[in-house]
Image (cartoon, helix red, strand yellow):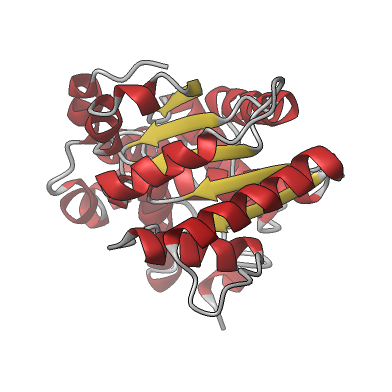
Amino acid sequence: MSYYRVLGLDKEPFSTSPDPAFFYQTQQYRATLANLLIEFRLRRGLSVVLGDIGTGKTTLGRKLIQLLRERNGFIFHMVLDPTYPTEDLFFASLSRTLGIEVPAASPTLVDYREALERFLFRKAVEEKQTVVLVIDEAHKLNMLSLEMLRILLNYETNEAKLLQLVLLGQLELLPLIQHMPNLADRISFKSLLRPLDLSETQQMIHYRLQEAGYQSASPLFLDEAVEEIHAVCEGYPRRIAMACHRALRTLVMEGMRTVDRAMVESIVRDEVAAGWSGARRLQKSGFSA
């Protein structure tokens, strides 16, 4: 029997997979999502969301897609691996992602660009649809791909951009954009995802347990355990989920009722804290929301 059923849960509460159902929306996440939706409605073009490893960028992207799926008038796609060595491969992949048929048998770069422009004009202007492209792991984009995206952002009417582009990336994306002033000045909205504070960490743990079906009045995590998890994990959601999973697994194996500080100290600190310096990277990034 899975450990979560032993604890009175219906499913795994602390998976690190980017499941929108387990995405606890702090104030900053809610604000980021709300601002992105406004940018789309106004068709402003380029939005950039940065965050260190484990701050929830991918899950936020999945949540954004879920929100768009619930709304009318949107065409949306999410690119998970944006690594393209050549311009042709970049546009060919983008055309396939958007479902664009390029008429030429052996399309050239010009063929791809013209087909993309026709597609965006038809969808955004003639059909009044909002075309949204979300690129995860955007820090993997090379300068060539970023230049191609800049070109796509040039497709516009007098009133609006034809493509709404969201770049979700680690902090390494920032210097790439800064080296391209003609792309940087196109950013209409930017957000920096920061680690959770102690209260948000406690709320995230409670929310995930609730979503997984926990109904007992007895807490699985004592306040002192949550404090220790927050300190060890520095407020990073992915690390918090990993720590909580290990704690619940140990809870079952040792036949205990609640996770306390001593348990967290004994099973988590050495594994989870080793080598993490995310907060310092954020402080040095120079990126401000």
Residue 40 to residue 16: above or below? above
Name the foreground residue: 95 vs 42.
Answer: 95
Q: Residue at the bottom extreme? A: 1
Give the percent coordinates (x, y) of residue 32.
57, 27
User: Horizontally, is 118 left or right of 221 in the view?
Assistant: right
Name the foreground residue: 50 vs 212.
Answer: 50
Residue 105, quarter of the rendered image: bottom right
- In which quadrant will I find the N terminus? bottom right
Asked whether the viewer can see residue 210, the reply is no
Residue 183, quarter of the rendered image: top left
How many numbered circles are shown?
0
User: Horizontally, is 138 left or right of 173 in the view?
Assistant: right
Give the percent coordinates (x, y) of residue 277.
17, 36
Give the percent coordinates (x, y) of residue 175.
22, 30
Q: Residue at x 57, y 68 (%)?
A: 96
Asked whether the viewer can see residue 241, the reply is yes
Give the percent coordinates (x, y) of residue 18.
52, 56
Name the foreground residue: 164 vs 218.
Answer: 164
- In which quadrant will I find the C terminus? top left
Residue 260, quarter of the rendered image: top left
Q: Residue at x 77, y 51 (%)?
A: 69
Q: Residue at x 32, y 41 (%)?
A: 170
Q: Residue at x 31, y 38 (%)?
A: 52
